[in-house]
Image (cartoon, helix red, strand yellow):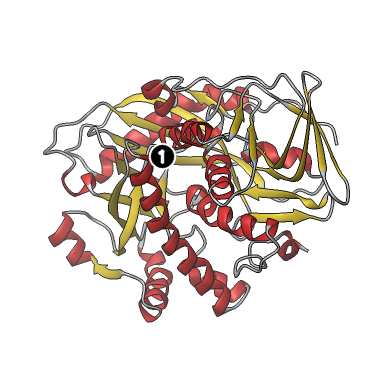
Amino acid sequence: MDKEEKMDLKSGYPFWAVKNGLMYAFPQLDADLTCDVVVIGAGITGALIADELAGHGHDVVVVDRRDVCWGSTSASTALLQYEIDTHATDLAKRYDQASALLAYQSSLRAISEIEELAHEVGDVDFANCDSLYYASNCSDVSSLADEFAWRKQHGFPVRWLSRAALKDEYEFKAPAAILSSVAARVDPYRLASRLLKRMQRKGVRVFDRTEVTSMTATADSVQLITDSGMSIKAKHTVVASGYESQHWLRQRVAKNLSSYAYISDPVNPVEPGWLANTMLWESSRPYIYLRSTGDGRLLVGGEDDDRDVPARRDRMVERKAATLQRKVGRLFPHLQAQPAFAWAGTFAETSDGLPLFGEHSQHGPRVLFALAYGGNGITYSMLGAGLLRAQIEKRSHPLTGLFSFARLE
């Protein structure tokens, strides 16, 4: 199947790219090669999957049409949560209790796995934090209370905060909230870049500015042809090119949106208060969210809209940043958090908030997809790395069915 036009995935000035610059240089592919697995996509999803495979003895090649991490990873706001955008209670109604529990427990475990990897790689601005999920209005309190009761019943680390408790403990005005003690933050661009460089030092072949233009799967291999006419023959291919991955599928499996964010200059250490170690998000959809960074900035995101048109998105960045700033001002009148850098990016979501990992009937079992769509992209990618390795090694995995394309049928 031939590729389509390169997507314009981001607008404005994503902070991670500005802060870190081009961290490492990787070569373009200039010769034919063979391998066990080729991973298309050198962002955070591709890096996590390649690392999992290479770390367990697979000969891995990674290719990306851009410089590494220069797509959606550079625009990610990297809120690491086990809390899925779809409530567990809603997942249980749509599927069953076991599926909801599996999705949430797996995501909870993934946070500690990311933490372990981040500390192993080092210097990626990783930090554990709390997550405060508040009711945007009184009408949302009932559904939030049901969600809290479900999580508490199943042993998740949560507390219920009433309006009075929020005022007393946080000096924050909201009808109610769920406080989760497991969440984290990271610099996704830095984590992926350092992970890819570490893999390269260990023998993984990483190529950027190398575009795959066609992919042909047979019963025992996959052949890729690049824009320079080079051939890569692999036993398996993993398509981990983020929102561009849908170009390889005729079936529409997710909806593309535009999401917006800004980051402040470093603020007075006294000003953020509890926001320094607590991410904040709300029950309304789309929601506004806030988190801190290791150098004392506040990152604010939200204002998603359902029109992923690059030219329009470009025009909307400053306006959306101003709207987000006004919302922050209403929540925290004392807080000086003006935009220093503002950006927007393509964001995709599935109908149930769960990702898609594995084979698709269009390409057969040798081509596996890693579509870590939704607000939990990095968490999902961590889970998907183990899931896809199990499929390549012909082993069972508890998440195979729940995260498969079959649930869309």
Query: Height in image: 338 above or below 375?
Result: above
Whether residue 372 appears in this view of the structure is no
Query: Height in image: 385 above or below 397?
Result: above
* Dot 1 alpha-carbon crowd within 10 angstroms: few under 14, some 14 to 19, many 20 or more: many
Kindly identify the residue that appears in the image at 26 percent across and 26 percent down: 265
Q: Position of residue 368 (x, y in %)?
A: 72, 50
Q: Is residue 386 left or right of residue 123?
A: right
Q: Quadrant of residue 72?
A: top right
Q: Position of residue 159 (x, y in %)?
A: 27, 70
The amino acid type, in three-letter code, at marker 1 is Gly
Q: Which residue is mark 1?
A: 301
Q: Which quadrant holds the N terminus?
A: top right
Q: Position of residue 79 (x, y in %)?
A: 40, 47
Whether residue 171 appears in this view of the structure is yes
- Towards the viewer: 148 or 103: 103
Kindly identify the residue that appears in the image at 40 percent across and 21 percent down: 18
